[in-house]
Amino acid sequence: MRALLTLVGHDLRQHLRDRSMLLFAVVIPLSLAFVFSLAFSGIEDVALDPVTVAVSAAEEDEAAQAVVATLEGLPEQGVEADVRRVPLAQQDEVAAQVEDGTAGVGVVLPEGFGVALSAGDGTAGVTVRLGPDAGLSGDVVASLVASTVARMDADAAALALAAGSGEGAGLTGAQVDALAAELAGSRPEVERTGARVSGESLSLSSGIVAGQAGMFLFFTVGFAVLTLLTEREWGTLGRVRTMPLPRWMVPVSKALVALLLGVTSTTVILLAGAFLLDGVSFGSWPVVLLLVVAVVAAATSVMFIILRVAATSEQASLAMSVIALTLGVSGGSFFTVPTEGWVGRLLTVNPVAALIRGLGITSGGGGAAALAPVLLTLLAFTAGALLVARLLPARRDAL
């Protein structure tokens, strides 16, 4: 054990003195994360512009007035909507206001809307017009009208079913009438929130930081493991093996150094991003650290495959760069990757994609239990890569 610690300590000192290691492990990924975050800052801050809504509905129609009341309640939900009532007799004025720009959205609930709703045809005749400058706010209003009418239509169908089978269900006529009154007087509530569900994607800035950390992780662990080839070329490995040490001790020491450097660099990048960039959060840090260790182990296992197939340190460096860029890009370092279909399932085994997915879980409040599928995926990836490295015929033995 003392000999192993000596080898690990020696390699750590060597790498910490190497400026290229510090550049690829911390400086470059952090710089790229800052640049990309600044370049795309504000892209997620979608603000709804104020919108004027002209709505025409019969005063005596309770169902139609319920839709109007829903629109008038938009300001309470954080949407600045100025709802202007137009008498149903002057419903043509709604279209005129939309055409001349006085109103961004026009809604007409026809005469007999409530009766049609009771007959199961509540959507018939409902007209929604969007002006050229309605924008996203207009789309929100149009979607709200459609969803409100659809809900009321479903409620009417349920009421008709209750009335038709009231006797068999034990409902009295008074109870059916009470249910009808409750549905007629209810106002659908709209809640606008920006919360994310645990397990969903990271915010844009958080995804950028996580993606850069994951991609450059391969360079960090590669510097640690692939020094075996350099030491073999310089004759250092041969001299070490003349010492009374187990054959496995040298590659294990490289793996431990890679693990220490990878965990440290990735954690530093994530911490720096969380504290220095707006809107970056990764959740509970002990859980994040558990994820980082698993990702670093997976990345390190890939380097041992390169050791088996590369004949020189130059070939190993080239292979490391290709693998780092390939896994980084396909894992979501620069853009969102698909999560559905066979392509999405294939990409879930990518350590970079697993890191981003896991951080999405932790940032949403997920703990170690919620992270279990990602950790198991990384464990399977690590075991598979090490098995491949073991079974591959070596071009020149560095292990």
Image (spheres, rainbow, N blue to C red):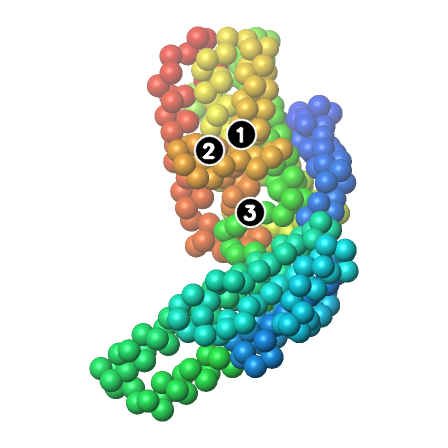
Residue 285 vs 72, above or below: the answer is above
Q: Which residue is mark 2?
A: 347
Q: Which residue is mark 1?
A: 330
Q: Residue at coordinates 45% horizontally, 36% vertically from top-left?
A: 344
Q: Amino acid at mark 3?
A: Ser
Could you tell me which secondary element the residue under label 2 belongs to? helix
Residue nearest the observer in this picture, 191 or 332: 191
Q: Residue at coordinates 57% horizontally, 60% vertically from top-left?
A: 127
Q: Mark 3 or mark 1, which is nearer the start of the sequence?
A: 3
Q: CA distance from mark 1 to mark 3?
A: 16 Å
Residue nearest the observer in this picture, 324 or 186: 186
Q: Is residue 315 visible?
A: yes
Q: Residue at coordinates 66% horizontally, 54% vertically from top-left?
A: 130
**Contact between labelled residues 2 and 1, with CB atoms less than 8 Å apart:** yes
Q: Amino acid at mark 2?
A: Leu
Q: Quadrant of residue 57?
A: bottom right
Q: CA distance from mark 1 to mark 2?
A: 7 Å
